[in-house]
Image (spheres, rainbow, N blue to C red):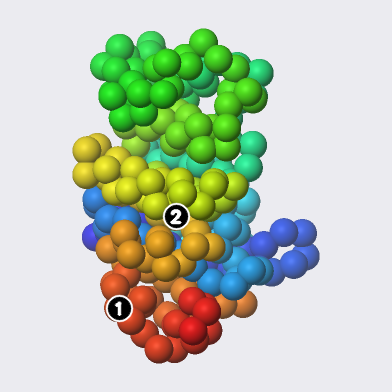
Amino acid sequence: MALLEARDVVSGYGDAEILHGVDIDVEEREIVTIIGPNGAGKSTMMKAVYGLIDCWSGTVTFAGEDITDLRADRVTERGMCYVPQRENVFPTLTVRENLEMGAYIEDQVSAADLEAVWERFPILEERQTQKAQTMSGGQQQMLALSSALMIDPDLLLVDEPSAGLAPDLVGDMFDRLVTIRDETDTAILMVEQNARKALSVSDRGYVLDMGENRFEGAGEELLESDDVAELYLGG
């Protein structure tokens, strides 16, 4: 059984059905990327998995438990965290306060968890008293990821981790995600527009198109697929 199993997920917003029966699996310690054109339903799928929007039909199972109808806070308590593309830090709080908020379900903030953050992102230790809103986009993304990792999740959902980053920082961000997986055993499911970079570090990938599964396979296989390249990777 996979760590995450989403089956025949139908969901959307208001009266607009965006997902028309999507399937997604994530195994333990895997990095899985969802790619596809704008409007394909990638971020909608992420939100449906995490409980931010309702699944109109279908099921989501996490670590063997049906979480289809759970609120996002309850999903977090079970070991899944979500890093949205935008508004993913508390802008008026300091770096350290953001990390403490990330550990809100814990009885107290672990010194070991903080030390792990400092070792992974030394810049955050240097700026732990700085307000998040004064940091660069790349630094805020580091903080958002670190905040989500404060509860040592089994699965991390990341929506567009490279969005807003300077081009020379994009590769570094994907390298950091691999390091996070390797050092923490946390599986990662991400949505990403930079499909080539994301698939190059992914164990597997899914291509969504118009709210449906179009292709799936190993990251390298999708990169080498002529159909995927022509339709979704710019040829």
| Apparent side of residue 235 relative to residue 118 in the rendered image (left or right) | right
Q: Going by the picture, which residue comes out furthest to the front? A: 168
Q: Mark 2 to mark 1: distance in Å? A: 18 Å
**How many labels sit on residues?**
2
Q: Nearer the viewer, residue 17 or 128?
A: 128
Q: Judge the density around disc 2: few (<14), some (14-19), many (≥20) Cα neighbours within 10 Å.
A: many
Q: Nearer the viewer, residue 183 or 163?
A: 163
Assign the N terminus to one quadrant of the image. bottom left
Q: Residue at x 28, y 63 (%)?
A: 203
Q: Position of residue 79 (x, y in %)?
A: 36, 37
Q: Position of residue 110 (x, y in %)?
A: 32, 14
Can you identify the residue that label 1 sits on? 221
Q: Point out the tag, 2 or 1, that comes first from the N-terminus.
A: 2
Q: Amino acid at mark 2?
A: Met
| Disc 2 versus disc 1: nearer the observer | 1
Can you identify the residue that label 2 sits on? 190
Q: Judge the density around disc 1: few (<14), some (14-19), many (≥20) Cα neighbours within 10 Å.
A: some
Residue 57, can we see it?
A: no
Q: Are marks 2 and 1 in contact (CB under 8 Å)?
A: no
For residue 105, above or below residue 5? above
Q: Residue at x 58, y 26 (%)?
A: 135
Numbered tag placed on residue 142 in the rendering: none
Q: Position of residue 108 (x, y in %)?
A: 38, 11
Q: Amino acid at mark 1?
A: Glu
Q: Residue at x 34, y 36 (%)?
A: 153
For label 1, the SS is: helix
For residue 32, above or below residue 123? below
| Apparent side of residue 90 relative to residue 97 in the rendered image (left or right) | right
Q: Position of residue 96 (x, y in %)?
A: 47, 15
Q: Nearer the viewer, residue 235 or 37?
A: 235
